[in-house]
Amino acid sequence: MSELENFDPDWLALREPVDHATRSRRLEELLAARLTGRDRVRVVDLGAGSGSTLRHLAPRLRELGVGAVQDWVLVDHDEDLLARALASPVPAAASVRTARADLADRDALRDVLSGADVVVGSALLDVLPAPVAAGLVEVLSALDPRPAVLFVLTVRGGATTEPAVPGAAEGFDADQRAHGLGPDAAGVVAEAFTAAGWSVQRAATPWRLGPSPLLAAWARGWFTAAGVVPQPVSSAVVPHEDLLAQ
Ligand SMILES: C[S@@+](CC[C@H](N)C(=O)[O-])C[C@H]1O[C@@H](n2cnc3c(N)ncnc32)[C@H](O)[C@@H]1O
């Protein structure tokens, strides 16, 4: 397994309520419409972390009229996060299992995606290096039948703060690009899906943060990565994007 970053579970917990409130309702409705009338659906969550998407999307699909039993597979390279996901209550009419895998490993990816009706990922695409994202679209495109794919909360560049801090967004975005696709991820992946014949819908899903522990934690990380002296900010708009491919 390659050298992979471990995400702080406290950070994931802090962002979870805002993530849940921010996700595109329209794309969720389109996904649910495709699943109506099914008895059972297999949902594979890539880069599942501690299970945020399961906690949001499983009940949300039921609310949208999807009566199917949902069999979730949570995939991540980080076993500690997967253990946390398993420790939370299982949503009604769902089964949950975990699989440890590196998304850069195409054989492992094919294995976990086999039989998937829905593939989801949250806050994932921007952390993936370009070849891993390209491999992911390639493996998804080779599945027969193809699943519906919902990647949400992909970071876009150009976050803004009040007061404005010159150079911070540019510094942060450059740092992200040094680690993965960063702010280019949503565009690159959308183009790859379209080129492979998928129908792609995109929705802007920005965080709009006021004074809160999340704003404070986000700003600390943002200034540090940007190489800018941390400054107090009272609000921020952090662009994200959701993408549905089917
Ligand atoms: C920002 S976190 C998001 C976690 C979760 N989806 C959420 O929304 O809370 C990104 C997740 O992707 C996982 N990840 C990143 N690169 C990966 C890879 N190559 N293989 C497997 N998991 C990976 C990380 O371990 C982490 O759990």
Image (cartoon, rainbow, N blue to C red):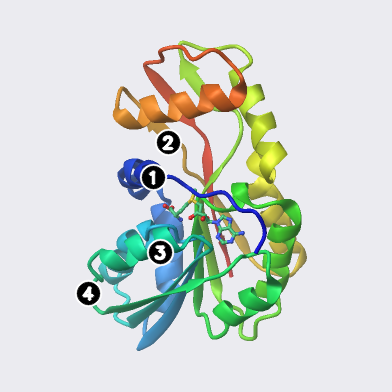
Q: Position of residue 41 (x, y in %)?
A: 41, 82
Residue reaching furthest bottom? 39
Disc 1 element: helix
Sequence-wise first label, 3 or 2? 3
Q: CA distance from mark 2 to mark 1?
A: 7 Å
Dot 4 amino acid type: Ala
Where 180 falls versus 121 (above or below)?
Answer: above
Q: Position of residue 245 (x, y in %)?
A: 59, 65
Q: Kindly indicate whether the residue at mark 1 contacts the one at mark 2 (C-beta within 8 angstroms).
A: yes
Using a 10 Å C-alpha cutoff, classify the residue at mark 4 as few (fewer than 14 neighbours), some (14 to 19) or many (20 or more): few
Marking on residue 92: 4
Disc 3 element: helix
Dot 2 amino acid type: Trp
**Residue at x 62% of width, y 61% of height:** 200
**Residue at x 36% of width, y 16% of height:** 234
Which residue in the structure is indicated by mark 2?
A: 207
Q: Nearer the viewer, residue 49 or 37?
A: 49
Left or right: 172, with 15 as reference point: right
Disc 2 element: strand
